[in-house]
């Protein structure tokens, strides 16, 4: 993940880590989660009742066009409907939500046609049926300056007429067409329809009624955020003018049944009569205990700290689940800075590093398996890359605890005959100031020094780490020990392209932290991008993963898992996509 | 004087404070009596125990919590030392009143003087507020506060030092007490004011027929007001007697020192005042024998051997001093000192045999300490 | 008096402007996270970043940004909009004040009710076991950090996770209503926070009052009161406590001012949606407008209560005149 390990979409796990200063995510692999999700059978629940999610922070946006954080997603996917989504019962398979069926891709792979289900209506005060125009408008507004959307240009810039720069107010996008009320067509400039279709799960596809939203969207920034209307089984309480009375920013969110929702059109069972989110529970230990010992409570953002987690593993095993966070944590080595431009030296570092010690700083086994590459377990391309164990060709990644002899031999190959690095320059290292990241950085520091490196070790807040140093190539940080990247959706592109493609290097907001710009990798990425979702695509991305790993641009050390806890009387269903309780599936026992 | 029970009869009063540094014997076997309508001056340097003895009479040292008190304080025959807190409280401010040295700090800064005067009345008398107020106005007028009806609502900080002391006196006398203890009532006042205050005290004493204990370090002050004088040194009375007797024929070397340090109009201007050399002794480690001996030019070995008791030494009844010098020798020495002789010369000129041998160290050390 | 008040109020405005300026400068010069990047997200294009920078007005030079902010504040009483979620900072602050006020005022009542009697008893009975016990406890209460004491109290007494479940715990603050509109619901929820908040203040006030009263009781005017024959109880209260407690008003004004600006720790531990938590959250998110707003409101309370204290003082101490 790039900026803000704390708040980005699908990085809830980090939140635990950063805010609560204790390692949090994941567990050993043999601890089979008791909560549902990941394609396991979803238990039927009882109708009725109410559940409260205890959260630390607030949603980033209620506006589906702008939200881009895990917690925003957790709310969005229970109160809104997107074209496609994931059913906990079927796992990572994309299923139609508003759409009536799978996306139809033209033979030239440049057109996507989606048919919409009838009978999906907006909540009060709009109350009318959703049409394809509402989805077209949702896209158009998300490309405007008034609705800052963080990913629209990344995944949808290939749509014909998609603006390069944010427009002044929502503007027509010629490539999104609505031949009739229930059909939407995306015309693309490149033959990558399959890849674009895979992104149609994102909240940008949640419909927005133009005639209602236009007056809010005319303002910059748009005020639709506090006047959102809903299509999902639930809605945030509002008044007749559409003001969200149920959302008290920083305090609470109250969701009630959406009277216009028709169960027949939706895969969500929506057992609960209502649910709400209580915010500001900054002490994760207290919040987790309240959840485990209480009634009708589930985890919001955040995660139980290690000591509560250990207790939960023994005493509340039926109230705990782990959801793969879908990402990798690593120490980035800036390949443009001497001596890290030397591949053998990088391999020497990877060989010599005790990655188990790095993981231990976050909590050890419980936070997830030790990573060797950049596609985590159960993610498309993971198995194709070789699974949990590093393939044999990566001799420098075989030992979890470091192989000093191998490190020395690579060091010799790199031109340091003593087997240790002998340069005297001080390498700028930017570490986070909060545990456990700080502990990880300190462990890394001592390991680098053991290998002979001298560091200029600077400690800054996590946000500053990204926005002022690691994501700004001009800042010339040599080592970024606290970076990581997590999925946008279930496609390897979302993990590998922003982080290792030479084209992704930006002057600011850069997430290719090693600044890897390797022609072979770039080519493999370009090729993989053209392949339709499916085994072939996964294989192509696995090739990218292996090619990147062969270049040793970073020290991957953990594939995080997100622990989720709930009260005894709650029937939990985890949304693995958002790594959080799926409120539209959760029920009371 | 001896015809009836004295108003106040203090017998062998001893007050010891337990402190972290040791026991401070502030008052040591002090005895004196006052009759109705008379005035007694208690004279001594600070730390001589003169204030403590009178605070003890009032029962105010009880609040210190660390005071050990023995002896008797008989007020109209009742022993105040054994009296209950409530009984004492009823006497305080009623039959026995006290005024203090610093009228600024002795008045509560947050309350108007009227408020404080009225409180004094109503503590002891069951009268209405307005009656008490009338009485307060009357008293303020009596003590010479101009326009008392207007000024009664003023706060202490709005009065001058002398005026405040008048307020204190008014407060003391407001319940027509039988005994008024005035502790250094003029010390904190500006130059010309003390005389007025003393005049006021004297006048009021006559008008109210109040007995007064006037505590001061200044013999000149008692000379104006009192009939009898007790001189205290280091917690003990070293000389007591009628005012005239003490001024005419002081018996104790300490009293001589006090008298010689008063500016006198009957002596040539060029004559320097003679300060008493040295400092008052520590009350924790008092000198053996006569506490004054380290500062006394006439100290001899006999002074160290035992504490001299008050003798019945005066020509008038009740004039007594605690000194090892024979009475005739004292008269001769004082006469010589008064004429300007040095202590050595005065001692040498005595015709009366003086017991003991002169201490070599004492005067020299004392003189050195004084410089 | 009126001139004094007018002068002080004008001075207050100057101070608030200076404080807002300093906050602004700290924020713009010290290395903190870039609010645009925080808001734009990890996949944001440079164009989106540029557009957001413009939307937030961050493309202008800092002095112009500050001038716009100040102008809106002075002429429209407009604190701007949150960088994070576009919500009016003024609306947020006014929404949060009741919770903070309820916490601070209730806590104050408790700490005064506990601190004053303890201080008086300790002073009057000083040296006794009562004094020693009270002062020992006070020392413990002062040394215990609020977040620690808060957690201990939660684990001991809160209804959901406590060993002795008697008080409402974390997050029980009602979603609607304040202490003034929903006294029972809010009061129940605030009981534990009040106690935790009040503990250290009660201890400080008890110690302060004990020291003050001990000194006052040796004052000459207390001796005068006793010499007048005033009852000891009256001496202690009317003459002693009356004088000893006056300086407490100054401290109380300051403390209350600080707390009305947000009791960050207590609000965070007990999840009370007050100004303190708003400040805490906004600092974490580099949300300058909200940080500015909370700083200004906190400063306002402190300065304003100082003024009130000075005015009250004139009535309490006749020697003070303006």
Image: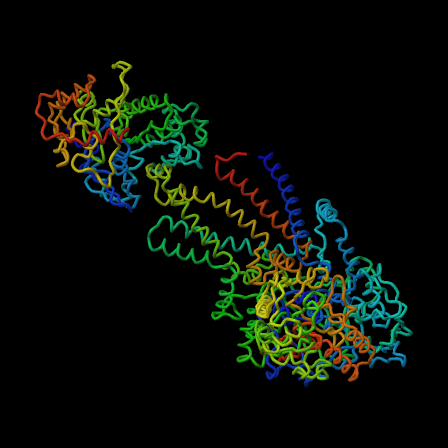
Extreme residue in the front direction: A417
Residue C45 is situated, as x and y percent measured from the top left of the image, at 79, 64
In-image side of A131 versus A317 (left or right): right
* Nearer to us in this view, A156 or C212: A156
Residue B52, quarter of the rendered image: top left
* Nearer to us in this view, B331 or B70: B331
Q: Quick check: A450 above or below C258?
A: below
In-image side of A148 versus B195 (left or right): right
Number of on-image labels:
0
Residue C238, quarter of the rendered image: top left
Point out the image quarter for the C terminus of chain B. Answer: top left
Residue A286 is situated, as x and y percent measured from the top left of the image, at 55, 69
Residue B118 is situated, as x and y percent measured from the top left of the image, at 39, 34
Is residue C320 among what the camera can see? Answer: yes
Extreme residue in the left direction: B353
Is residue A569 among what the camera can see? Answer: no
Point out the image quarter for the N terminus of chain B. Answer: top left
Q: Quick check: A200 above or below B52?
A: below
Q: Quick check: A280 above or below B256?
A: below
Residue B40 is situated, as x and y percent measured from the top left of the image, at 23, 28
């Amino acid at each position: 993940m790039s900026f803000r390990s704390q708040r980005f979409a699908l990085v809830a796990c980090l939140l635990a880590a950063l805010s609560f200063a204790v390692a949090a995510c994941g567990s050993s692999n043999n601890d089979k989660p008791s909560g549902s999700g990941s394609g396991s059978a979803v238990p039927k629940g009882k109708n009725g009742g109410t559940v409260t999610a205890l959260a630390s922070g607030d949603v980033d946006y209620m506006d589906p066009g702008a939200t881009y954080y895990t917690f925003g997603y957790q709310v969005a996917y229970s109160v809104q409907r997107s074209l496609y989504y994931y059913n906990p019962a079927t796992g990572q398979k994309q299923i139609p939500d508003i759409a009536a069926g799978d996306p139809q891709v033209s033979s030239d792979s440049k057109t996507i046609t989606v048919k919409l289900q009838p009978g999906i209506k907006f909540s009060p005060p709009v109350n009318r049926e959703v049409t394809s125009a509402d989805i077209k408008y949702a896209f158009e507004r998300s490309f405007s300056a008034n609705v800052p959307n963080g990913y629209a240009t990344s995944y949808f810039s290939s749509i014909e007429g998609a603006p390069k720069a944010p427009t002044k107010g929502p503007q027509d996008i010629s490539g999104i067409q609505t031949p009739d009320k229930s059909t939407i067509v995306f015309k693309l400039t490149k033959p990558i329809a399959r890849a674009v279709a895979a992104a149609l799960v994102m909240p940008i596809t949640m419909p927005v009624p133009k005639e209602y939203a236009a007056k809010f969207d005319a303002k910059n920034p748009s005020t639709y955020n506090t006047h959102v209307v809903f299509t999902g089984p639930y809605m945030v309480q509002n008044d007749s003018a559409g003001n969200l009375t149920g959302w008290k920013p920083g305090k609470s969110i109250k969701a009630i049944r959406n009277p216009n929702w028709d169960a027949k059109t939706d895969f969500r069972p929506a057992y609960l009569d209502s649910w709400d989110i209580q915010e500001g529970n900054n002490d994760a230990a207290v919040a987790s205990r309240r959840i485990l010992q209480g009634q009708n409570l589930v985890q919001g953002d955040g995660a139980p700290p290690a000591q509560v987690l250990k207790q939960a593993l023994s005493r509340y095993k039926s109230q705990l689940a782990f959801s793969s966070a879908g990402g990798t944590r690593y120490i980035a080595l800036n390949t443009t800075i001497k001596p890290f431009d030397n591949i053998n030296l990088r391999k020497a570092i990877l060989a010599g590093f005790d990655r188990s010690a790095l993981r231990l700083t976050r909590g050890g086994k419980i936070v997830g398996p030790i990573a060797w590459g950049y596609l985590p377990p159960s993610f498309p391309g993971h198995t194709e890359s070789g699974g949990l164990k590093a393939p044999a060709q990566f001799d420098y990644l075989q030992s979890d605890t470091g192989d000093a002899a191998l490190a020395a031999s690579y060091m010799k190959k790199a031109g340091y005959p003593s087997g240790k690095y002998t340069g005297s320059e001080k390498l700028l290292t930017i570490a986070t100031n909060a545990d456990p990241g700080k502990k990880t950085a300190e462990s890394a520091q001592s390991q680098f020094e053991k290998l002979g490196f001298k560091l200029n070790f600077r400690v800054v807040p996590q946000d500053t780490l990204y926005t002022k140093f690691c994501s700004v190539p001009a800042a010339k940080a040599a080592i970024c020990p606290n970076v990581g990247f997590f999925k946008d959706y279930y496609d390897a592109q979302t993990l590998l392209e922003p982080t290792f493609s030479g084209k992704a290097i930006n002057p600011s907001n850069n997430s290719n932290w090693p600044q890897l710009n390797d022609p072979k990798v770039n080519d493999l990425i370009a090729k993989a991008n053209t392949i339709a979702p499916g085994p072939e695509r996964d294989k192509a991305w696995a090739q990218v993963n292996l090619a990147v790993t062969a270049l040793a641009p970073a020290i991957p050390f953990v594939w995080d898992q997100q622990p989720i806890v709930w009260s005894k009387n709650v029937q939990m269903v985890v949304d693995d996509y958002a790594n959080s309780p799926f409120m539209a599936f959760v029920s009371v026992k | 004087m001896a015809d009836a029970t004295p108003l106040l009869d203090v017998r062998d009063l001893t007050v010891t404070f337990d402190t972290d540094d040791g026991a401070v014997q502030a008052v040591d076997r002090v005895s004196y009596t006052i009759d109705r309508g008379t005035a007694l001056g208690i004279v001594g340097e600070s730390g001589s125990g003169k204030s403590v003895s009178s605070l003890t009479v009032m029962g105010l040292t009880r609040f210190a919590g660390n005071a050990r008190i023995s002896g008797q304080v008989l007020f109209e025959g009742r022993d105040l030392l054994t009296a209950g807190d409530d009984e004492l409280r009823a006497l305080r401010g009623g039959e026995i009143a006290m005024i203090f040295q610093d009228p600024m700090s002795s008045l509560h800064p947050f309350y108007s003087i009227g408020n404080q005067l009225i409180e004094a009345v109503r503590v002891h008398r069951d009268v209405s507020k307005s009656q008490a107020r009338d009485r307060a106005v009357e008293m303020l007028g009596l003590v010479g506060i101009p326009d008392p009806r207007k000024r009664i609502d003023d706060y202490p900080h709005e009065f001058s030092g002398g005026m405040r002391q008048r307020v204190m006196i008014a407060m003391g006398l407001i319940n027509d007490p039988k005994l008024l203890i005035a502790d250094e009532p003029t010390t904190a006042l500006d130059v010309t004011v003390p005389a007025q205050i003393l005049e006021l005290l004297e006048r009021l004493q006559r008008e109210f027929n109040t007995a007064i204990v006037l505590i001061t370090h200044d013999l000149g002050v008692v000379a104006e007001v009192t009939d009898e004088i007790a001189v205290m040194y280091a917690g003990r009375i070293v000389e007591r007697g009628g005012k005239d007797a003490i001024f005419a024929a002081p018996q104790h070397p300490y009293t001589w020192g006090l008298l010689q340090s008063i500016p006198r109009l009957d002596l040539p201007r060029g004559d320097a005042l003679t300060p008493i050399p040295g400092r008052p002794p520590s009350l924790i480690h008092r000198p053996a024998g006569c506490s004054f001996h380290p500062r006394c030019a006439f100290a001899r070995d006999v002074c160290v051997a035992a504490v001299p008791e008050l003798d019945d030494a005066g020509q008038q009844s009740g004039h007594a001093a605690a000194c090892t010098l024979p009475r005739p020798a004292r008269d001769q020495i004082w006469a010589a000192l008064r004429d300007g002789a040095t202590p050595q010369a005065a001692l040498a000129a005595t015709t009366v045999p003086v017991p003991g041998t002169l201490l070599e160290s004492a005067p020299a050390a004392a003189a050195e300490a004084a410089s | 008096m009126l001139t004094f008040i007018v002068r002080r109020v004008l001075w207050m405005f100057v101070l608030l402007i200076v404080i807002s300026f300093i906050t602004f400068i700290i924020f713009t010069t010290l290395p903190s996270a870039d609010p645009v990047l925080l808001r734009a997200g990890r996949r944001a294009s440079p164009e989106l970043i540029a557009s957001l920078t413009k939307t937030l007005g961050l493309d202008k030079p800092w002095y112009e940004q500050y001038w716009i902010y100040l102008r809106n504040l002075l002429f429209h009483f407009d604190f701007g909009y949150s960088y994070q979620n576009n919500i009016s900072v003024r609306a947020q602050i006014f929404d949060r004040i009741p919770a903070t006020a309820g916490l601070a005022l209730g806590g104050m009542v408790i700490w005064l009710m506990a601190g004053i009697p303890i201080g008086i008893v300790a002073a009057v009975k000083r040296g006794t076991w009562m004094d020693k016990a009270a002062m020992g406890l006070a020392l413990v209460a002062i040394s215990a950090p609020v977040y620690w004491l808060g957690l201990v109290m939660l684990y001991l007494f809160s209804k959901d996770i406590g060993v002795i479940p008697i008080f409402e715990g974390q997050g029980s603050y009602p979603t609607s209503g304040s202490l003034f509109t929903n006294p029972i619901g809010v009061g129940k929820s605030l009981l534990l926070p009040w106690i935790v908040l009040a503990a250290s203040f009660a201890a400080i006030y008890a110690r302060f009052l004990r020291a003050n009263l001990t000194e006052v009781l040796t004052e000459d005017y207390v001796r005068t009161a006793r010499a007048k024959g005033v009852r000891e109880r009256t001496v202690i209260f009317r003459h002693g406590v009356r004088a000893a407690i006056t300086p407490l008003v100054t401290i109380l004004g300051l403390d209350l001012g600080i707390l009305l600006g947000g009791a960050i720790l207590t609000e965070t531990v007990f999840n009370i949606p007050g100004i303190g938590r708003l400040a805490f959250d906004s600092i974490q998110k580099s949300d300058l407008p909200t940080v500015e707003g909370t700083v200004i409101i906190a400063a306002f309370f402190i300065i304003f209560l100082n003024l009130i204290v000075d005015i009250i003082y004139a009535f309490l101490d006749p020697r003070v005149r303006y």
